[in-house]
Amino acid sequence: MLFDFNLLVLIMFCISIIGIIINRSNIILILISIEILLLSVSMNFMLSSLINFSLEGQIIAIYIITIATIESAIGLSIIVAFYKIKGSISLKLLNLLKG
């Protein structure tokens, strides 16, 4: 049974990496792929804590989920601000920023 969950975590991890590689122009899809990546990593920590009968993996998973939530909120607010300025959320326009 644990093999099935490990296989699910591996499939989620691979799908998120492929999503990041393929969707190079849409920032929202990249953000969703990063969220799936962090979810698969936290599931892996929970599975390892289940195998070892310890709580450390579950605590780390809660930290990862909290940080992922904060990261997505900040990322979406930056995307909304960028859309108000440029009128598009394409990553090709990010190279035009001067700084």
Image: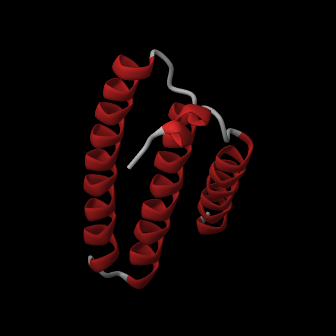
- On the question of residue 32 being in view, the answer is no
Residue lying at 27% horizontally and 60% vertically, measured from the top left: 62
The residue lying furthest to the front in this view is 98
Nearest the camera: 55 or 40? 40
Please give left or right for residue 31 compared with residue 61 in the image. right
Q: Position of residue 51 (x, y in %)?
A: 46, 79
Nearest the camera: 43 or 96? 96
Nearest the camera: 30 or 66? 30
**Up-down relation of residue 3 to residue 40 (above or below):** below
**Up-down relation of residue 94 to residue 81 (above or below):** below
Residue lying at 28% horizontally and 79% vertically, measured from the top left: 56
Q: Position of residue 4 (x, y in %)?
A: 66, 60
Report the number of discs.
0
Q: Position of residue 87 (x, y in %)?
A: 45, 15
Residue lying at 44% horizontally and 21% vertically, measured from the top left: 86
Residue lying at 60% horizontally and 59% vertically, measured from the top left: 9
- On the question of residue 25 being in view, the answer is yes
Image quadrant in which you'd find residue 58: bottom left
Give the colouring mode of the picture.
secondary structure
User: On the rendered image, what quadrant is the N terminus found in?
Assistant: bottom right
**Up-down relation of residue 79 to residue 83 (above or below):** below
